[in-house]
């Protein structure tokens, strides 16, 4: 089968920043599914790992990344009970294993869901990693619930990005929250509104902009960009006994003592935690993805797909990574095989 990977971390301008190569189709064992891939989504984690994981080293065989896929089950391991050959599935995968930038991939059934039936493979491939991240952050980490939290306010930093786009929808449509999203360009502000944001504010003057919209403080904050950059604003804007959740990678410590006076809780989210540590509730991602697929099929949630490349090639993968590195992407970018 064909795969695309890299042997060392290089800028996209270098010819060998991605390499196409042939490898054997693997055989599934245990809980593994062998999935024939139809479409993949591109995320910021892809280019970050490409840029940083193989600095100052060169592998003999290329590293395969990629964490968003839609495909069909081609074979199953001897312990598989959730799926059968021929099932259409979607998933984000496991960061410790080969990614989806290949024609066939092994993935543990417990982190896989049945793909939505009423949208295209490209539209579905835009969803898994970001939806899992948003669901886990809002429901598993921050423990929000529509019965107790409906009508409360949430500030989402980075509303036009992949996670932000689906988080706006979940916060508005499933939790009934008043959603304030950040964006700075006219097109990204418009996108946040189409996703369901009640207010869109410019992140460059965050405290003033939020308060000008009538919110002295907010009940919840989602940091999807840079907890260091916005920390002082968070301390000012979070309501007493509120919650802050973050997926960003701080380059410096944050002073959690500043939250003590307000008894504010802080929550980290990494979508790969369950698979990395084989947690007892690893199958939770299977259930989340099935819920998301049902919500997509019912039209309650919408795909966040914005840009599609047709054809599994080095050229297209480089172009998709270039878009992610620009920091200007809106919604999700997908590559269809």
Image (cartoon, rainbow, N blue to C red):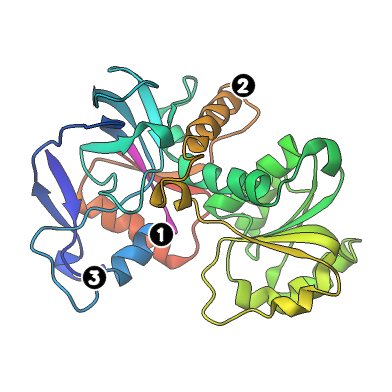
Q: Position of residue 280 (x, y in %)?
A: 48, 41
Q: Is residue 6 visible?
A: yes
Q: Position of residue 29 (x, y in %)?
A: 22, 32
Q: Quadrant of the C terminus?
A: top left
Q: Position of residue 247 (x, y in %)?
A: 56, 61
Q: Position of residue 310 (x, y in %)?
A: 29, 39
Residue shown at the point (24%, 76%) measured from the top left: 55
Find the distance from the CA under tag 3 to the CA under tag 1: 14 Å
Principal SS element in the magenta part? Answer: strand
Q: Are marks 1 and 2 in contact (CB under 8 Å)?
A: no
**Residue that label 2 marks:** 298
Name the mark on residue 54: 3
**Residue that label 1 marks:** 45
**Residue 61 in which image quadrant:** bottom left
Q: Nearer the viewer, residue 326 or 139?
A: 139
**Residue 121 in which image quadrant:** top left
Q: Is residue 112 left or right of residue 319?
A: right
Residue shown at the point (47%, 52%) measured from the top left: 273
Mark 1, secondary structure of its residue: helix
Q: Nearer the viewer, mark 1 or mark 2?
A: 1
Magenta highlight range: 39-44
Mark 2, secondary structure of its residue: loop
Could you tell which of marks 1 and 2 lies nearer the N-terminus?
Answer: 1
Q: Sort mark 2 into few (<14), some (14-19) or many (20+) by Cα contacts within 10 Å.
A: few
Q: Are marks 3 and 1 in contact (CB under 8 Å)?
A: no
């Amino acid at each position: 089968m064909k795969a695309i990977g890299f042997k060392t971390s290089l800028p996209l301008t270098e010819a060998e920043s991605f390499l196409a190569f042939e490898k054997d189709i693997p055989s599934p064992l245990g809980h593994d599914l062998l999935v024939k891939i139809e479409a993949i989504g591109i995320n910021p984690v892809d280019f970050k790992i490409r840029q940083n994981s193989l600095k100052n080293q060169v592998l003999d065989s290329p590293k395969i990344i990629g964490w968003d896929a839609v495909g069909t089950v081609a074979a199953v391991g001897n312990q598989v009970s959730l799926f059968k050959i021929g099932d259409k599935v979607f998933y984000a995968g496991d960061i410790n294993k080969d990614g989806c930038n290949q024609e066939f991939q092994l993935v543990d059934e417990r982190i896989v869901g049945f793909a939505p039936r009423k949208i295209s493979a490209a539209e579905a491939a835009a969803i898994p990693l970001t939806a899992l991240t948003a669901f886990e952050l809002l429901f598993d980490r921050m423990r929000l619930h529509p019965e107790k939290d409906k009508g409360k306010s949430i500030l989402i930093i980075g509303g036009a990005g992949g996670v932000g786009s689906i988080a706006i929808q979940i916060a508005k449509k499933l939790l009934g929250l008043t959603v304030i999203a950040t964006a700075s360009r006219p097109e990204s502000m418009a996108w946040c509104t189409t996703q369901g944001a009640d207010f869109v504010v410019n992140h460059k003057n965050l405290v003033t902009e939020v308060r000008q919209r009538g919110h002295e403080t907010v009940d919840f904050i989602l940091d999807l960009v840079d907890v260091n950059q916005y920390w002082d604003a968070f301390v000012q804007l979070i309501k007493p006994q509120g919650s802050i959740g973050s997926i960003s990678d701080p380059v410096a410590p944050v002073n959690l003592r500043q939250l003590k006076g307000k008894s504010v809780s802080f929550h980290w989210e990494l979508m790969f935690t369950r698979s990395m540590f084989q947690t007892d509730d690893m199958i939770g991602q299977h259930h989340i993805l099935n819920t998301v697929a049902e919500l997509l099929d019912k039209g309650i949630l919408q795909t966040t797909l914005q840009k599609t490349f047709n054809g599994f090639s080095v050229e297209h993968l480089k172009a998709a990574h270039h878009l992610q590195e620009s920091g200007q992407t809106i919604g999700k970018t997908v590559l269809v095989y």
